[in-house]
Image (cartoon, rainbow, N blue to C red):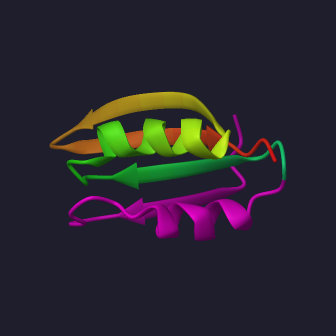
Amino acid sequence: MAVAKSIRISGANCLGPVELKKAIADVPVGGLLEVVTNDVCAKEDIPTWCRFTKNELVEFQELGDGWMRFVIRRTR
């Protein structure tokens, strides 16, 4: 699975939807955005953001040491 863009966010307290909106704008429709973060709120915030924006959460992984990986498909 090839990603069109990858972002890494470290030390954020509750990842803002603004960062996700900016990043997904650089991804073509149907393309994949990878988000690697240690933001404690991301586990709930990113799936909620995907549902709200109608993008698809394709994959979630816990990487260890508090790090998580999300892969989001841009749908529109």
| Residue furthest out toward the left | 65
Q: Is residue 17 magenta?
A: yes
Q: Nearer the viewer, residue 53 or 67?
A: 53
Q: Residue at x 36, y 64 (%)?
A: 9
Q: Quadrant of residue 69?
A: top left
Q: Is residue 56 left or right of residue 39?
A: right
Q: Is residue 75 above or below residue 17?
A: above
Q: Nearer the viewer, residue 73 or 64?
A: 73
Q: Position of residue 2 (x, y in %)?
A: 71, 42
Q: Is residue 53 magenta?
A: no
Q: Residue at x 32, y 46 (%)?
A: 42
Q: Residue at x 18, y 43 (%)?
A: 66
Which span of residues is magenta-colored? 1-28
Q: Is residue 18 above or below residue 42?
A: below
Q: Position of residue 14 (x, y in %)?
A: 26, 59
Q: Nearer the viewer, residue 58 or 64?
A: 58
Q: Residue at x 57, y 42 (%)?
A: 52
Q: Is residue 44 left or right of residue 70?
A: left
Q: Position of residue 33 (x, y in %)?
A: 62, 50
